[in-house]
Image: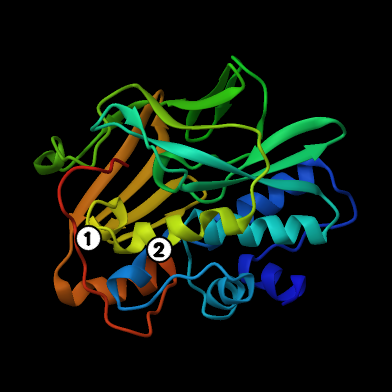
Amino acid sequence: MNLEEYFARTGYKGSLENQDLETLTDIFQHHIRAVPFENLSIHCGEKITLELEHVYNKIVHKKRGGWCMENNQLLGWVLKCLGYDTSFLGAYVFNPHENAYATIMTHLLVKVVIEGKAYIVDAGFGVSYQMWQPMELVSGKDQPQAPGIFRFTEKNAIWYLEKMRRKQYIPNQNFSNSDLLEKKDCRKVYMFSLEPRTVEDFCFQCTYLQTSPDSLFTKKSICTLQTTDGFRALIGWTLTETKYNYKENMDLVEFITLKDEEVEKTLKDKFNITLERKLVPINIKGFYTI
């Protein structure tokens, strides 16, 4: 494992001299635009494991993506190698259909401290809830970014992330009531404490999420990638492309339904992913919004 290979994978060619916020942001944005958030291994007969060498080989050599425990673990390793003050945190993801936070800690985050200021760096959420810049860990402050307005709120040592979105324009009205579309203007995302975590804290969750029939990730095949002006997502056979703020306070969301024979080519053309095994797409309704 080496940093040169990782940066070749993400296309980052900037300076590495300073461990500052500007460099961190640039490295982070190259990661989320090159490395998809995806769970395709579950749906093509592969097992997801959390050993760093395996994650590195999958993302860097095989040019795959991963979920939070893979993306953020790799990014955390890169930042630590560069000399950043980093640690892992664990979050409980909000389930809008149950209107409650998960009871299992399934989301791995990176906390970075620069000149006494703490930032949350999360390269592993995907779709419109994917932050584009490190978020300062302060309570009650709106932090506008290209995807929308993010905000942390702290109460009794628990931190809550929420996101406010723009209105959406959907040219293909056949999808105007799609269960993939978020209907609320403000959406809770996850909650977490500042207790440091290790990758080992997520071993049970890693197995559970890829095997349980109750897991979102067994119900849907997901591949999403941030672009320079929005993001793409392939959920089952549904390809969406979102362009942020294409008109004032309006996001453009385009939907296409793929045929089985189009999925493999779309993964290659839109996400730069070539699978070693055959994907079996799945999209059980509910549980997930873009």
Q: Residue at x 16, y 53 (%)?
A: 284
Judging from the image, what secondary structure is the residue with disc 2 in? helix
Which quadrant would the N terminus be assigned to in this image?
A: bottom right
Which residue is denoted by mark 1 in the rendering? 236
Residue 87 in percent (x, y) is at 72, 47
Residue 153 in percent (x, y) is at 56, 19
Characterize the local packing of mark 1: few (<14), some (14-19) or many (20 or more) Cα atoms within 10 angstroms.
many
Q: Residue at x 70, y 68 (%)?
A: 7
- Mark-to-mark CA distance, 2 and 1: 21 Å
Residue 31 in percent (x, y) is at 60, 57
Characterize the local packing of mark 2: few (<14), some (14-19) or many (20 or more) Cα atoms within 10 angstroms.
some
Is residue 9 placed above or below 134 in the rendered structure? below
Q: Residue at x 47, y 63 (%)?
A: 66
Which residue is denoted by mark 2 in the rendering? 207
Q: Name the quadrant containing residue 37.
A: bottom left
**Between 289 and 227, the one nearer to me in the picture:** 289
**Residue farthest to the right?**
17
Q: Earlier in the sequence, mark 2 or mark 1?
A: 2
Q: Is residue 131 left or right of residue 286?
A: right
Q: Amino acid at mark 2?
A: Thr
